[in-house]
Image (cartoon, grey):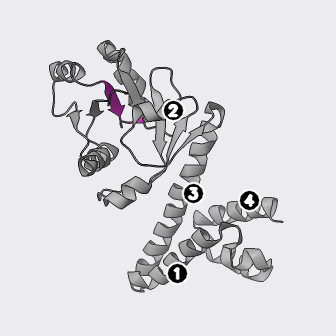
Amino acid sequence: MKQVPTYAIIGNGRLARHLTHYFNLLKIPFLQWARNTHSAADLKITAAQASHFLLPISDNAIESFIQKHSFLKNKTLIHFSGSLITPLALGTHPLMTFSNDLYELATYTSIPFIYEENTPWDDLFPQLPNPHYPLPLSLKPFYHTLCVMSNNFTTLLWQKFYQELSQTLKLPIDAIHPYLHQTFKNLLNNPHSALTGPLTRNDQFTISSNLKTLENDPFQNIYKAFLEGYNAIKP
């Protein structure tokens, strides 16, 4: 019988809070250490009790943290960066966006984990019911780039819409919600045919009018970049 890991979660940032909440919901015991609430001596005590150290900390802090605490070298170290590749720790990335609000159990269990190929997932997280998929190391940076573009970039666009809706157009914020919901519903139902609007119609008159309204607005360059990208990939 495989030994069940004993976990220590490092840090208390946003992802760490979600992980601790998820583990609590699943009743998976764990220890926690954070530099702003614990001492270096506490970390050594934690290391004596835990077999697996989870590192939901900033990408640029992962390797330095491991190198600084050499007594962790015999532990199983797991980071959650979508882009970092390091021989110092195993990488697995939750394909999810994490807000300040904690989620329900069903949301957490639905999160796919994308882990580095040849990583022994079942040995790392035998108690997690999440879907999980291996990814070759050579594709990991590109995978994370897609994550950033799809989530972060679209969020910036929607934030722009919310801001202009309330400040410039003087319309109620909730006026956008049906449009927002249906946009993502269309993507979920059929991502390949979800695009609508002047780009799909090749409506040059409307496109030109759109661009004119964005004069002296940095988002005009974003509109042009999307137009260029669409023209390069359209059927």
Residue 84: assigned label: 2
Going by the numbered disc 1, the residue's amino acid type is Tyr
Range covered by the magenta-colored residues: 51-58
- Gap between marks 2 and 3, in whole Å? 19 Å
Going by the numbered disc 3, the residue's amino acid type is Ser
Q: Earlier in the sequence, mark 2 or mark 3?
A: 2
Label 3 SS: helix
Q: Earlier in the sequence, mark 2 or mark 4?
A: 2
Q: Determine whether label 1 and label 3 are within 8 Å by CB.
A: no
- Report which residue position mark 3 lands on: 150
- Gap between marks 3 and 4, in whole Å? 14 Å
Left or right of residue 203: residue 124 = left
- Report which residue position mark 4 lands on: 229
Label 4 SS: helix
- Gap between marks 2 and 4, in whole Å? 27 Å
- Gap between marks 1 and 4, in whole Å? 23 Å
**Quarter occupied by residue 12:** top left
Quarter of the image with the N terminus in it: top left
Q: Earlier in the sequence, mark 2 or mark 1?
A: 2
Residue closest to the eye, 208 or 110: 110
Q: Determine whether label 3 and label 4 are within 8 Å by CB.
A: no
Q: Earlier in the sequence, mark 3 or mark 4?
A: 3
Q: Nearer the viewer, mark 3 or mark 4?
A: 3
